[in-house]
Image (tube, rainbow, N blue to C red):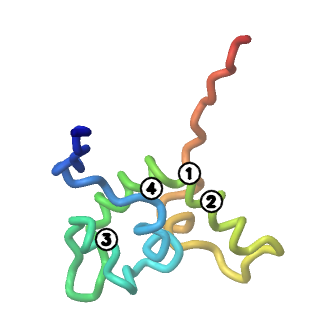
Amino acid sequence: MPVRSRRSKRRQGAGVGAWFDVFEGKFDFFGELEAAGVDLDRNGKPDLEVARTAWAELGEAFMEEFHARYPDGAHFTPWAVEQFGAPPQRKRRLQRR
């Protein structure tokens, strides 16, 4: 009999999709972060330091998604950019052939 693969029981961190609403407009409108285990206040806002840490990790990917959703440019600046500044750029390694 084949071995059945098991799903990791460790909770996976919230990705860009879960943080998108917060980075864009300050609030978690659909409760995706809460479902991922991030504590929110009664208004649906995460702690500012938690958001800052997530921005440092996911900001570049968020901006790629944001520009994909608004290819002609948005009429507003995302909340995370106003609050924390431009996301840090990751150095990409060149692949040797």
Q: Around disc 4, counting alpha carbons within 10 Å, would you say few (fewer than 14), some (14 to 19), or many (20 or more)?
A: many
Q: Which residue is mark 4?
A: 55
Q: Label 2 amino acid?
A: Met
How many numbered badges does the structure rendering display?
4
Lower position in the chain sequence, tag 2 or tag 3: 3
Lower position in the chain sequence, tag 2 or tag 1: 2
Viewer-side residue, 88 vs 8:
8
Q: Label 4 amino acid?
A: Trp
**Residue 29 placement, left or right of 12:** right
Q: Label 1 amino acid?
A: Pro
Q: Is residue 23 placed above or below 57 in the rendered structure?
A: below
Q: Give the alpha-carbon distance from disc 4 to disc 3, as whole Å.
A: 14 Å
Q: Residue at x 49, y 70 (%)?
A: 20
Q: Nearer the viewer, mark 4 or mark 3?
A: 3
Q: Give the alpha-carbon distance from disc 2 to disc 4, as whole Å.
A: 10 Å
Query: What element does badge 3 sit on?
Result: helix
Q: Give the alpha-carbon distance from disc 2 to disc 3, as whole Å.
A: 18 Å
Query: What element does badge 1 sit on?
Result: loop
Residue 58: x and y, percent? 48, 52
Q: Nearer the viewer, mark 1 or mark 3?
A: 3
Q: Is residue 90 placed above or below 4 in the rendered structure?
A: above
Q: Which mark is residue 72?
A: none
Residue 51: x and y, percent? 36, 62
Q: Which residue is mark 2?
A: 63
Q: Which residue is mark 1?
A: 87
